Image (tube, rainbow, N blue to C red):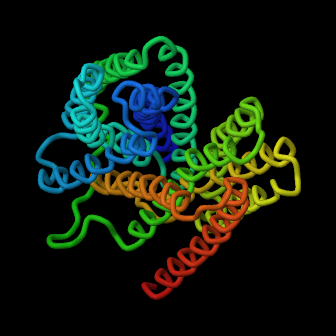
Amino acid sequence: MIAEVGDKSTRKAALHPFTVGCVLLGVAAIPDAMVVPVMHDLCVTRFGITEGAAHAFMVVNLLGAVLAVGILALLNRRIPTSKLLLIAAGSSSLLMAGMAIAPSWWVFLSLRCIEGGADLLLLSIPFRMIASCGKGERYGGRMGAAFTVMFLALALGAGIGTVIGQDHATNVLWASAVSCGVLFLIVAFVQTTVDITSVSPRPDAGKCPLIPSEWIGAIFLALDRGLSALVSVTLPLLIVSGFEVSKWTLGVGIGGMFIALALFSPAAGILADRVGGLRIRAIAACVSGVGLIGLGLMNVVPPVVILAPSLMLYGVGAAGLMPSAFSSCVRPEASTLVFSSLQAAGQCGYAMGIVAGGILISIYAVPAQTMLTILFPIAGVVFICINLLLISLLRLTRKTVR
């Protein structure tokens, strides 16, 4: 009876940090997506730069993220997690406002770089809270729910950005500053919950904070984000240039992909808890890869027929990638530094995906139609092979340790 009461008390106590973590994550993710629909107006129209140079806006925040990881390592937990979150939210709000009034492209880009470090903390700390707030056997399910919250918040942010940025693109930056200000107030109200949930064991003296499996987890996240960069940035450019695809068809395909991501993430996390994260990772990688391989059929099948199903299939697979990566590789009790390092690895992969797509389009002078039907099937096959190789390596490592 005592054990049963204890379990119920633990479950009840874990509900509050989980809810707080999801609220913080959702509010933090909204400003990230607000700028995407108006990026052309924010960069090209406002400062008179080229479309190629505008890609730096999405890449440069990686530098700030790496800097934030370095600062976390130097601080070595001298500042409470809630204070870090307050500093990040306040800084992000001020930096967004600064970008709205930036007098030049380089000032704008510099502020964006610094904001990348604050953004890293705003996302990684709520993920850390959600990971550690409940039972270990439900870890994957919690992470799946967290990614659903994030995907829904990103979709909401993109919608808000589209609406308020129609007249003036800088309205989006002011709205983002207000959102981060609201986040600051929320964090100030829940500081105790943030600090209690974020307690984690210290690594042994002289040892790396990341254990070997977490390094592989970082590679998984970099691969996932790199592939998502190709799908979200390079794919629309090639489709518009090479195929007579209406905005409605493209919107249905991309919208269906995000819906699949949001709907299937919790299910993938729950399955990872029951049958093992590595099995779900292997299945998810194969499904994602097959979805991209399907895009190679656009030369023989009308895009209106094949585009939406292929992107939705990719979305179903991608929904299982990140929950299974955390479930199989990352300790739920890992520190904020570990979760921030993983987030930085994902941002690095995203930046590399954007750069790789831009380089391939620039170097190989082939029609956009040909590039799309060759690039994405190859990317799908390579993604499947690398994932299966890393999964085999992780399993072999665990057998050797035993």
In this view, the residue farthest toward the bottom is 400
Q: Nearer the viewer, residue 329 or 322?
A: 322
Q: Position of residue 234 (x, y in %)?
A: 58, 49
- In this view, 108 is above or below 382: above
- In this view, 163 is above or below 310: above
Residue at 32% from the left image edge and 38% from the top image edge: 119
- In this view, 273 is above or below 81: below
Position of 361 with respect to 313 (left or right) is left
Residue at 59% from the left image edge and 68% from the top image edge: 278
In this view, the residue farthest toward the front is 365
Q: Nearer the viewer, residue 215 or 304?
A: 304
- In this view, 224 is above or below 27: below
Q: Nearer the viewer, residue 142 or 92?
A: 92
Q: Position of residue 217 (x, y in %)?
A: 45, 64
Quadrant in the rendering for residue 109: top left
Position of 154 with respect to 267 (left or right) is left
Residue at 69% from the left image edge and 45% from the top image edge: 239
Q: Position of residue 346 (x, y in %)?
A: 43, 54
Observer able to see residue 250: yes
Image label count = 0
Q: Position of residue 140 (x, y in %)?
A: 55, 52
Position of 52 with respect to 259 (left or right) is left
Quadrant in the rendering for residue 112: top left
Observer able to see residue 138: no
Residue at 22% from the left image edge and 24% from the top image edge: 103
